[in-house]
Image: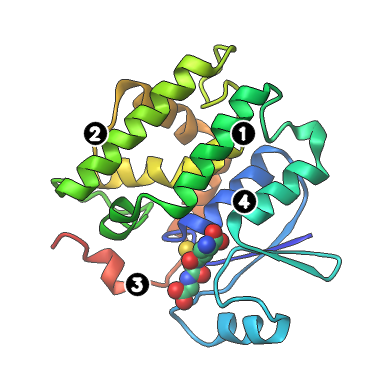
């Protein structure tokens, strides 16, 4: 199994399945295709008839593209890892929140791109404030719905945490306030050895994407 990703410094979509694989202790190889530096990603996409975006998971020649499709594949293939919660109601909430993350939060995603290595406080715009309020509601819904006391969204780590992991970096990097529940979750996420490995790998990268490094200046 081979996961194709891009910059660990910047790539929120790459982080999601990578984190789920690492936390679940599923063995995989990885290749980083730096999309703004060279033609590697474009060539890869043409060769495999996939979009010129990552993440892409290759399993015995089968290409699975798009973060959520990869996460669903992992949940189905490794049921013993409990990547979706067992409780049907909590699972439905998780799927709703993950789908919303995948298609929504446009203002937050575009105005505050993930950069795990830059702290630059910013006053959120009105559309971003609306996204932050929505996140606070989602965290409150999970807190009301989960039955275990674990610190992750569903109690134990799940796909919901993987999908929202980049929001932890965005909140830290741009000093965005969401809620106390969010802060407790974010602390637990940052303590995951896999998150620390991701940020250390990103620190060793030498590529820079200027427009992401100068947001808010
Ligand atoms: N909807 C896709 C989004 C993937 C995506 O946009 N990935 C970015 C990296 S974070 C990318 O590959 N960008 C390539 C480019 O902009 O050329 C998913 O969930 O996997």
Which residue bears the numbered disc 2? 177
Name which residue lies at 51% across and 20% down.
151
Name which residue lies at 50% across and 86% down.
38
Compute the Cα span from label 3 to label 2. 26 Å
Whether tag 3 and tag 2 are in contact, CB under 8 A, the answer is no
Give the percent coordinates (x, y) of residue 177.
24, 33
Under 8 Å from ligand 1: the CB of mark 1? no
Give the percent coordinates (x, y) of residue 14.
55, 58
Which residue bears the numbered disc 1? 158
Which residue bears the numbered disc 3? 209
Neighbourhood count class around disc 1 (C-alpha, 10 Å): few under 14, some 14–19, many 20 upward = many
Compute the Cα span from label 3 to label 4. 22 Å
Neighbourhood count class around disc 2 (C-alpha, 10 Å): few under 14, some 14–19, many 20 upward = some
| Disc 4 element | helix
Q: Earlier in the sequence, mark 2 or mark 1?
A: 1
| Disc 2 element | loop
């Amino acid at each position: 199994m081979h996961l194709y990703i891009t910059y660990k410094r910047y790539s929120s979509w790459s982080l999601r399945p990578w984190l789920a694989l690492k936390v679940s202790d599923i063995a995989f190889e990885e290749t980083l295709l730096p999309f703004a530096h060279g033609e590697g990603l474009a060539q890869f996409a043409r060769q495999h008839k996939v979009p010129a975006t990552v993440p892409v998971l290759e399993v015995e020649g089968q290409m699975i593209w798009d973060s959520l499709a990869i996460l669903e594949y992992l949940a189905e293939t490794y049921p013993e890892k409990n990547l979706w919660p067992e409780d049907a109601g909590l699972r439905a909430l998780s799927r709703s929140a993950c789908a919303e993350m995948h298609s929504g939060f446009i203002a937050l995603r575009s105005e505050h791109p993930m950069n795990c290595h830059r702290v630059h406080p910013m006053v959120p715009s009105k559309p971003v404030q609306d996204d932050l309020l929505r996140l606070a509601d989602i965290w409150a819904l999970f807190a009301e719905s989960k039955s275990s006391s674990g610190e992750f969204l569903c109690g134990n780590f799940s796909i919901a945490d993987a999908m929202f992991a980049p929001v932890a970096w965005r909140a830290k990097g741009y000093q965005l306030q969401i809620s106390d529940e969010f802060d407790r979750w974010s602390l637990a996420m940052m303590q995951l050895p896999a998150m620390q490995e991701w940020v250390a790998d990103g620190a060793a990268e030498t590529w820079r994407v200027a427009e992401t490094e100068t947001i808010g200046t």
